């Protein structure tokens, strides 16, 4: 009987020990999670974080708070997160300009976007677009190029600021078309497009979300979309690629990142929670309301987006001889 009992015990599947089961369970935060936004409240990046907040709270089972740390075009708050230990309780909600342009145009940004962070997920994106004053006799890239060549050195263009994706995107356009124009920076996209409306400058590259009201009202004319596809609210305007400039891409995007020291299980758990959040109809509605395309995809996808943008903007800064601060 004792021998049969022993054999029976040996043949019974071993149950997982409690500590092994806990190790295999998905990571969950043990205290409130912070979404650190390196910009003031009210901007696109901040609005994105606030759209994600309720859904992420539900997915993680913890309170999620917003911490705005503005300064130096997002660099100050980005440095703060880069120096953190990476336990999953603080995520950086950052814009493309800070992650992929400031490291190119600043001599000492104080962080390396590829070495100091792990990508989690792309939250939203919006292509930049070229707009002109209605008096400009051009409706497409070819006509705009011909008009600009006729004007020679007598042209200027506006952007939302020095080192913005809009400035570098228009500089890339000048390089690809062999045209010339002087950059006139403004404090934000709204001021940049106002300058075109008032015909202070004849053209600009602006964020499509920022410029949507002025485009749809006819205050400015959109020439081309510097993104992979046409805009749903302006389907008649072709992309740059459709107009012969296949390699001309310029967009604004917002992604979520954690410090590089963050363990992989934590990073994966955060990606899973945010991917689920971005699929929620109310989140989609809030992001589309500000004219952004809802993101998603893998962590690898966001990492490639960062590296591709860094290569592109380094080339533009070099070829256009843009001064590095």
Image (cartoon, rainbow, N blue to C red):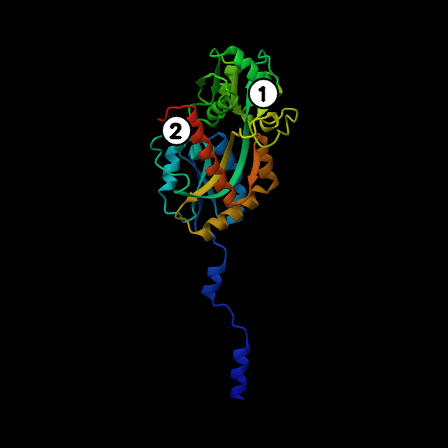
**In the image, residue 84 above or below residue 220:** below
Q: In the rendered structure, which disc, 2 or 1, sits on the residue that comes first in sequence?
A: 2
Q: Mark 2 against mark 1, which lies toward the viewer?
A: 1
Answer yes or no: is residue 153 visible: yes
Question: Of all residues shown, which one is farthest toward the right?
Answer: 236
x 59%, y 31%: residue: 289
| Disc 1 target residue | 141
Q: Position of residue 34 (x, y in %)?
A: 44, 42
Q: Position of residue 303 (x, y in %)?
A: 48, 42
The answer to which of 318 and 158 lies nearer the viewer is 318
Left or right of residue 289, residue 16 in this image: left
The answer to which of 184 and 280 lies nearer the viewer is 184
x 57%, y 12%: residue: 136
Q: Position of residue 72 (x, y in %)?
A: 38, 29
Dot 2 crowding, Cα within 10 Å, few <14, some 14–19, many 20+: some
The answer to which of 174 and 277 lies nearer the viewer is 174
Left or right of residue 109, residue 175 in this image: right
- Indicate which disc residue 76 carries: none
| Disc 2 target residue | 105
x 64%, y 30%: residue: 232
Q: Quadrant of the N terminus?
A: bottom right
C-alpha separation, residue under disc 2 versus residue under disc 1: 28 Å
Q: Position of residue 33 (x, y in %)?
A: 45, 45
Q: Quadrant of the C terminus?
A: top left
The number of numbered badges drawn on the structure is: 2
**In the image, residue 202 above or below residue 265:** above
Dot 1 crowding, Cα within 10 Å, few <14, some 14–19, many 20+: many
Answer yes or no: is residue 40 visible: no
**Circle 2 SS class:** helix
Left or right of residue 240, residue 110 in this image: left
Q: Quadrant of residue 314?
A: top left
**In the image, residue 87 above or below residue 128:** below
């Amino acid at each position: 009987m004792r021998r049969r009992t022993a054999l029976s015990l040996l043949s019974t599947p071993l149950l997982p020990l409690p500590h092994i089961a806990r190790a295999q369970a998905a990571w969950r935060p043990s205290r409130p999670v912070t979404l650190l936004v390196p910009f003031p409240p009210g901007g696109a990046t901040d609005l994105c974080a606030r759209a994600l907040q309720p859904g992420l709270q539900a997915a993680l089972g913890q309170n999620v708070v917003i911490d705005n740390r503005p300064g130096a075009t997002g660099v100050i708050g980005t440095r703060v997160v880069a120096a953190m230990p990476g336990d999953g309780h603080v995520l950086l909600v950052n814009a493309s300009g800070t992650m992929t342009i400031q490291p190119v145009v600043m001599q000492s940004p104080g962080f390396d976007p590829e070495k100091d962070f792990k990508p989690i997920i792309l939250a939203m994106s919006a292509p930049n677009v070229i707009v002109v004053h209605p008096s400009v006799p051009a409706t497409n890239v070819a006509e705009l190029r011909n008009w600009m060549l006729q004007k020679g050195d007598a042209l200027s263009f506006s952007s939302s600021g020095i080192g913005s994706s809009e400035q570098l995107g228009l500089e890339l356009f000048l390089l690809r078309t062999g045209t010339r124009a002087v950059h006139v920076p403004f404090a934000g996209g709204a001021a940049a497009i106002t300058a075109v409306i008032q015909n202070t400058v004849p053209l600009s590259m602006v964020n499509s979300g920022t410029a949507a009201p002025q485009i749809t009202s006819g205050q400015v004319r959109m020439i081309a979309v510097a993104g992979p596809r046409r805009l749903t609210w302006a389907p008649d305007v072709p992309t740059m690629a459709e107009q012969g400039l296949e390699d001309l891409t310029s967009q604004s995007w917002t992604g979520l990142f954690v410090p590089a020291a963050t363990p992989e299980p934590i990073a994966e758990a955060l990606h899973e929670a945010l991917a689920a959040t971005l699929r929620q109809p109310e989140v989609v509605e809030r992001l589309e309301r500000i004219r952004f395309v809802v993101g998603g995809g893998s962590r690898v996808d966001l990492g490639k987006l960062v590296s591709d943008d860094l290569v592109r903007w380094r080339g533009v800064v070099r070829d256009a001889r843009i001064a590095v601060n």
